[in-house]
Image: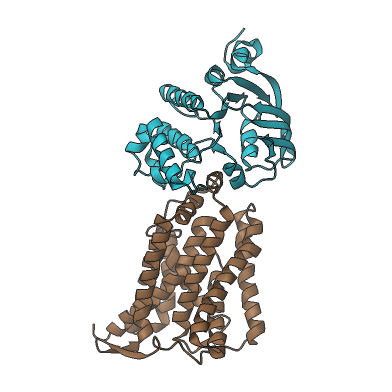
Amino acid sequence: MLKIQDLRVSYGGIHALRGIDLEVPDGKIVTLIGANGAGKSTTLRTITGLVKAEGGSIQWNGEELLGKSIDKIVSAGIAMSPEGRRVFADLTVLENLRIGAYLRRDKDGIAKDLKRVYELFPRLEERSWQLAGTLSGGEQQMLAVGRALMSRPKLMMLDEPSLGLAPLVVQDIFSIIREINRQGMTVLLIEQNANMALKIADLAYVLETGRITMSGTGAELLADEKVKEAYLGKHR
Amino acid sequence: MQELFPYLLNGVSVGGQYALIAIGYTLVYGILRLINFAHGDVFMVAGLVMVYATTAMPMYLALPLVIAATVVLGFVIERAAYKPLRTAPRMSLMISAIGVSYLIQNLAFYITGGVPQPVTTPIPWISDDILVLGASTKRVTIVTPILTIALVVLLVYLIQKTKIGMAMRAAARDFETAQLMGVKINSVISMTFVIGSFLAAVGALLYFTNYPSVAITSGAMPGLKAFVAAVFGGIGSIPGAVVGAFVIGLCEEVIKGLGYTTFSDAFTFALLIVVLCVKPTGLFGEKVTDKV
């Protein structure tokens, strides 16, 4: 379980996170919704260690993550599919997946996980020798998720997986997120597409200018008038 | 043709030396987007260490020591002068590189007293005179290109087929995402400096053994030429640096062979200007994509 308390982050005097509290229980899908610049990406980037926090705590199964190096956090079982997918364009699909397992030494386990990723995304197996830069946006998103899976994480964080993808492809990606979760993975999902995210989420938080303003189950927030108005594009 | 042959032979050898230095420029540029101005001076230090080491101890100790000392120097430069500037604008990094270059030259001035240090004990065997198809030369002329190609093949294998090589390619593309995969970015960067310095040390051994003395500015010209070679081939590309180096080495020597010795250096730098005007990405250069 991931437990964030009073997390504060600033960039050059601008407060990106003003003390947020958030819990991600094991085996659940938790989503963080909010407008652009609310601090969603900052939250994920701070968890991975890419961004240094100003104060607060991030506990992962009782262990403090703040101040740990990125590779230690990855080893602890946290993986991320970053915003914009960020696949390594001039590495092959297979190399992209292999680098996801960079910190692992168990050859058999890596081979097993590679097979599992290929089962989830048959398209990636067909294209394993292609350079990742030649894949379509949807395929790149699958690769980014597959790459994150290759570290055999316990918590998978996804930053805007639907960004710039066609609606049908978005549906594919979301059904795979569900599938990964069914296999036991804890998921922390950031989405602009609040509607889709709330539908699959067990728990949801609303982030506004660096503060959590609302939380509840996905269904609760989906039914909430204020959320409807602000994030689901439905008017009174 | 018969008169030009010795020059061609020399050109291939000079090209090999340039290639060994040029790879250092191109590797570092590939990952840090930095022109490491201190690289030519690292080459010079390798020459100085060779002069001192070969007079003080037997060859089998001296040569490994030269390589080890150069590698350590490259590593220390990165840790002391570039690593603290990881998040600074790229211009700061470049200024730091220029500073390191002057620092090394001045330290060398302090140690040598500004006097060129004569190469009294050239490396045996490769310094022997031999005849190649009627042309008299030293064995090092033949050894250099062969050794260069062998090292390049090894390097390409390392980068294409090994795990650390994969991490280097990933980091060259996207620092942040590579870190998200657990790649320790500082180790990868150190690795590129270690490889670059190692190759420069080998280049220095082959270069200075054939040379009367090592002065504190001895690294400047080969360093600049190798830099031109790296730009000509497309900076960031290893095959580019190698091809560029051999082309420049050959052209320079052929120009000398045709009796225009005065213009051989001018040719190289004119080539740099032409490349920058006509095709700034060089022969094999990637399109310039700035890292976000």
Residue A79 found in image quarter:
top right
| Residue occupying image coordinates x 71% and y 21% | A213
Residue B23 coordinates in the image, percent (x, y): 45, 66
Which quadrant would the C terminus of chain B be assigned to in this image? top right
Residue A21 coordinates in the image, percent (x, y): 71, 28
Q: Is residue B39 left or right of residue B269?
A: right
Residue A120 coordinates in the image, percent (x, y): 40, 31
B1 vs B182, nearest the viewer: B182
Residue A160 coordinates in the image, percent (x, y): 54, 30
Residue B216 found in image quarter:
bottom right
* The chain coloured brown in the image: B
Please tell me whether residue B141 is drawn above or below residue A8 in the rendered image. Answer: below
Please tell me whether residue A146 is drawn above or below residue B18 in the rendered image. Answer: above
Please tell me whether residue B138 is drawn above or below residue B31 in the rendered image. Answer: below
| Residue occupying image coordinates x 64% and y 82% | B109
> Is residue B77 shown to the viewer in this render?
yes
Q: How is the image coloured?
A: by chain
B278 vs A83, nearest the viewer: A83
